[in-house]
Amino acid sequence: MTKRNIVHIEIPTNNAKASGEFYEKLFGWQIVRDEQMDYTMFEPQEGPGGGFSPIGENTKVSDVLIYISSDDIDADLEKAVTLGGAIVMAKDEIPNTGWFGIFKDPTGNAIGLYTSMNPDYNK
């Protein structure tokens, strides 16, 4: 069973390269660019890593998004709805990586759910 840990954090930015340099200098995080996915990630020494999401129509500067590990994204999304939340994005695949979905809690906070294709990652 999944521990329900925070497994990924997304920080909005309009310049992933500059944001990566800032956090690398500030916290010593390793910055990794995935050209195939057009995505820049950060990896701290301990704890969850994450990436820099582009600011756009659906993402504002203050919209930091956390992802929680999930054994069953569809079931968790349905349960969130029954508890007063709302689905923002149904379960979708991240090629060669895993699956994710996003819901809003009753207050309006967006929370992501994530299941890795690597079964050891979810434990």
Image (tube, rainbow, N blue to C red):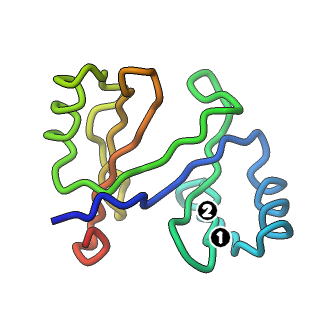
Question: Could you tell whether 99 is left or right of 46 in the image?
Answer: left
Counting residues from the start of the chain, the first of labels 1 and 2 encountered is 1
Residue beneath the point at 61% across and 44% down: 53
Marks 1 and 2, Cα distance to the nearest angstrom?
A: 5 Å
Q: Which mark is residue 32?
A: 1
Q: How many marks?
A: 2
Q: Residues within 10 Å of mark 1 (few under 14, many from 20)?
A: few
Horizontal side of 17 relative to 77 (left or right) equals: right
Please state if 25 lies on the left or on the right of 123 as rendered: right
The spot of residue 10 in percent (x, y) is: 57, 48
User: Residue 56 bears which disc, if any?
Assistant: none
Residue at x-position 56% and y-position 59%: 50
Q: Quadrant of the N terminus?
A: bottom left
Figure quadrant of residue 104 = top left
**Is there a contact, CB below 8 Å, between mark 1 and mark 2?**
yes
Residue at (20% x, 40% y) in the render = 76
Image coordinates of residue 113 in percent, x first then y, are: 33, 47
Q: Which residue is mark 2?
A: 41
Percent of width and height locating residue 60 = 66, 28
Q: Nearer the viewer, residue 33 or 112?
A: 112
Residue at the (63%, 73%) spot, across then down: 44
Examine the image and state in which quarter residue 32 appears.
bottom right
Relative to residue 45, is residue 2 depicted above or below? above
Instruction: Point out the image quarter for the C terminus.
Output: bottom left
Question: Could you say whether the residue bearing mark 2 is in a helix, strand or loop?
Answer: strand
Amino acid at pointer 1: Val
Left or right, 66 with reference to 4: right
Local crowd size for mark 2, using a 10 Å CA cut-off: few (<14), some (14–19), many (≥20): many
Circle 1: element type: strand
Residue 64 position in % (x across, y down): 60, 41
Q: Which corner quadrant of the image does residue 30 belong to?
A: bottom right
Check disc 2 and give the amino acid type: Met
